[in-house]
Image (cartoon, helix red, strand yellow):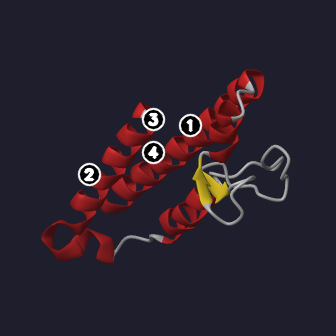
């Protein structure tokens, strides 16, 4: 989570710089690429294989619980494996969630860099 917090802080700083002086730097900058990246940010939190026992649920940070109906579970693959004391499955799910969070952090860092570059002109 530290890497995600750092990338979010970098993006926040880049956005503050872009919005300085009433956003004058943004007026001439093309933000199309940054916006496309931000649209992708939610998709980075998914996994093509989906959740264990529910491959149709792709999101790795929240989904309806396997045993709770539509009640939302956060980090469902990890949480449910722990609740069921399925330690091997929990370990595997932790790796998957860590990977999607790292991918998210990388995307946010890239968006911050592009935003900084767009305002440097």
Q: Which secondary structure lies at badge 1?
A: helix
Circle 2 SS class: helix
Give the vertical position of 40 relative to 5 (above or below).
below
Report the Cα–Cα distance between label 1 and label 4: 10 Å
- Mark 4 or mark 1, which is nearer the start of the sequence? 1
Location of the N terminus by quadrant is top left
Query: Which mark is on residue 109?
Result: 4
Task: State yes or no: discs 1 and 2 in contact (Cβ < 8 Å).
Answer: no
The residue sitting at the left extreme is 21
Task: Give the residue pinned by disc 1.
Answer: 102
The residue carrying mark 2 is: 13
Q: Are marks 2 and 3 in contact (CB under 8 Å)?
A: no
- Of the numbered discs 4 and 2, the one sitting upstream in the chain is 2
- Sequence-wise first label, 1 or 3: 3
> What percent of the width, then of the height, locates residue 119?
31, 61
User: Which residue is denoted by mark 3 in the rendering?
Assistant: 1
How many angstroms separate mark 1 from mark 3 (CA)?
A: 8 Å
Location of residue 67 in the rendering, given as x and y in whole percent from the top left corner: 73, 53
| Mark found first going from the N terminus, 3 or 4 | 3
Residue in the image at 75% along x and 27% along y: 86
Find residue 71 and report its image quarter. bottom right
Give the residue drawn at x 74%, y 48%. Answer: 47
Q: Where is residue 41 in the image (x, y as percent from the top left)?
A: 56, 57
Look at discs 1 and 2 and give the one toward the viewer: 1
Answer with left or right where residue 61 lies relative to residue 49: left
Residue 54: x %, y % from top left: 83, 53
Nearer to me, 86 or 9: 86
Mark 1 or 2, nearer chain start: 2
Could you say whether the residue bearing mark 3 is in a helix, strand or loop? loop
């Amino acid at each position: 989570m530290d890497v995600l917090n750092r990338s979010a802080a970098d993006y926040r700083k880049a956005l503050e710089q872009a919005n300085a002086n009433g956003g004058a730097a943004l007026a001439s900058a093309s933000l199309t690429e940054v916006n496309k990246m931000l649209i992708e940010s939610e998709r980075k939190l998914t996994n093509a294989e989906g959740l264990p026992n529910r491959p149709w649920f792709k999101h790795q940070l929240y989904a309806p619980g396997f045993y709770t109906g539509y009640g939302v579970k956060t980090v469902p693959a990890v949480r449910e494996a722990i609740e069921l004391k399925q330690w091997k499955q929990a370990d595997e799910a932790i790796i998957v969630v860590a990977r999607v969070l790292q991918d998210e952090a990388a995307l946010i860092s890239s968006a911050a860099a592009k935003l900084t570059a767009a305002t440097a002109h």
